[in-house]
Image: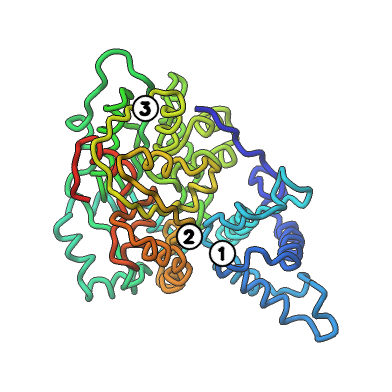
């Protein structure tokens, strides 16, 4: 499965000499903020835009109110706009002026990432960001001490300690740790297809599946086995998105390089890379070529996709096993922002609609989680506000089953609605098995 690797734009290319120039960044900020303030299409997506528009308006006199002047913005205004961006990508999805589509070449999320990277290069990485960028370290410790770690994550006193020491909000719902990782279960759970496989994939299981919810991974293995797909486990560490999002590009590049070193040989032998988190597949397909600028990174990017998109391609070729036995009835499907950003279409809804007696209602709204952003003490309450449209959509669907491709969005939705969204792989596996305990 090949897809186009996005072109680089000089203003957002970290290998361009001007990327780290503060005055060049300021000029680009003023250019983009001016155009955004004249358009204002994206005011509803996150806190960055209301703050930006309010700041620009506050510097206008009554006579100048119709004029936009971004040069009056103070450095602290820009910093606040940057801090409020949680990289959902919705502005980029909806913007009519993006690179390749318009000469203005606006890429607001990358501008925010560039500003954060310059800030980190100048001031260093905050302790909370350094810790949240190490999910494998946290996962290994949590899995090794799962009963105690899970108790502690539900203990009010410990959560207050975590808020003070680590900056993780005391009320943020955290996923439990699995005492046995997915990697340790892989060999016993995987059943290779008999005969010549229909296709071959390298499964980037993600830190969440490996340490928190390995059942998603074992269900994916079953779904692939029922479709004659050969699977190799290709997970070593986090994709690097937390580090990238927090501006630590040195760490993000190091993680990207190690993952490309792992994945490139699998791609070379004709495997498609699949990841059970849209954030991970987006990072590998969009950010790795920009971070590393190597042919191996571009090859990995071009062959990385989401599991449902991969299965939908089998369906389009007439190769999908459609021996589905049961269906969940009505499904409220939350389509994650980072899946929409990959422009793969609504493949999950297409697949789920193949199940018997199943009706899918798609909810296209941000959950507000967005990686580690919602976990932070200063962001959690805002994250729940920005997720209200998604929560409302799940509730109003009045469905027997909720679903999301993003396991982090599922946590956020469960915290707000009390409904735990299943991963599509879990729903498909249950249907193949003929289960009806939805």
Q: Earlier in the sequence, mark 3 or mark 2?
A: 3
Q: Residues within 10 Å of mark 1 (few under 14, many from 20)?
A: some
Q: Secondary structure at mark 1?
A: loop
Vertical placement of 379 versus 317: above or below? below
1 or 3: tag closer to the N-terminus: 1
Residue receiving disc 2: 366
**Label 2 neighbour load within 10 Å: few <14, some 14-19, many 20+:** many
Using the image as rendered, state which of residue 20 and residue 26 is in the foreground: 26
Question: With 24 as the anchor, is 150 left or right in this view?
Answer: left
Residue 75 vs residue 9, the one in the foreground: 9
Work out whether 50 lies above or below 314. below
Marks 2/1: CA–CA distance: 8 Å
Give coordinates of residue 74: x percent, y percent. 70, 75
In the image, 179 versus 252, the foreground residue is 179
Question: What coloring was used for the rendering?
Answer: rainbow
Q: Where does label 3 land, which residue?
A: 320
Residue 341, image x, y percentages: 54, 48
Residue on which the image places disc 1: 45
Using residue 257 as the reference point, say whether residue 74 is left or right of it.
right
Given contact means CB atoms under 8 Å apart, are the residues at marks 2 and 1 in contact? Answer: yes
- Does 314 appear above or below 361? above
Q: CA distance from mark 1 to mark 3?
A: 37 Å
* Secondary structure of residue under mark 2: loop
* Residue in the picture at 80% in, 80% down: 65
Residue drawn at x 38%, y 27% as measured from the top left: 201
């Amino acid at each position: 499965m090949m897809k186009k690797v996005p072109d680089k734009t000089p203003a957002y290319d970290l290998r361009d000499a001007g990327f780290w120039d503060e005055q060049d960044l300021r000029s680009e900020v003023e250019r983009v903020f001016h155009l955004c303030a004249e358009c204002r299409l994206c005011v509803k997506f996150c806190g960055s835009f209301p703050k930006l528009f309010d700041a620009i308006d506050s510097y206008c006199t009554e006579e100048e109110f119709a004029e936009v002047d971004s040069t009056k913005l103070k450095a602290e205004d820009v910093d606040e706009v940057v801090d409020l961006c949680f990289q959902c990508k919705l502005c980029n999805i909806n913007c009519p002026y993006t690179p390749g589509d318009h000469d203005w070449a606006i890429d607001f999320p990358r501008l925010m990432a560039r500003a954060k990277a310059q800030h980190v290069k100048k001031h260093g990485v905050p302790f909370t960001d350094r810790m949240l960028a190490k999910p494998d370290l946290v996962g290994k410790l949590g899995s090794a001490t799962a009963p105690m770690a899970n108790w502690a994550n539900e203990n009010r006193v410990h959560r207050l300690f975590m808020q003070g020491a680590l900056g993780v909000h005391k009320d943020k719902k955290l996923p439990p740790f699995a005492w046995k990782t997915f990697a340790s279960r892989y060999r016993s759970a995987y059943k290779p297809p008999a005969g010549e496989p229909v296709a071959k994939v390298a499964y980037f299981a993600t830190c969440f599946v490996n340490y928190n919810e390995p059942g998603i991974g074992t269900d994916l293995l079953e779904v692939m086995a029922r479709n004659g797909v050969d699977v190799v486990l290709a997970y070593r560490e986090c994709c690097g998105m937390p580090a990238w999002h927090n501006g630590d590009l040195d760490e993000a590049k190091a993680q990207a390089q190690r993952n490309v070193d792992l994945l490139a040989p699998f791609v070379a032998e004709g495997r498609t890379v699949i990841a059970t988190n849209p954030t991970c597949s987006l990072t590998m397909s969009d950010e790795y070529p920009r971070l590393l600028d190597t042919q191996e990174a571009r090859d990995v990017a071009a062959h990385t996709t989401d599991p449902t998109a991969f299965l939908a391609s089998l369906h389009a070729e007439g190769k999908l096993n459609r021996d589905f036995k049961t269906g969940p009835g009505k499904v409220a499907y939350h389509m994650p922002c980072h899946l929409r950003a990959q422009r793969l279409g609504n493949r999950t809804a297409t697949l789920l609609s193949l199940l018997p007696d199943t009706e899918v209602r798609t909810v296209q709204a941000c959950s507000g989680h967005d990686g580690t952003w919602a976990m932070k003490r200063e962001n959690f309450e805002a994250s729940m506000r920005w997720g209200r449209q998604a929560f409302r959509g799940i509730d109003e669907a009045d469905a027997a089953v909720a679903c999301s491709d993003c396991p982090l969005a599922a946590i956020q939705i469960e915290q707000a609605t009390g409904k735990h969204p299943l991963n599509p792989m879990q729903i498909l596996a249950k249907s193949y098995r003929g289960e009806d305990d939805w």
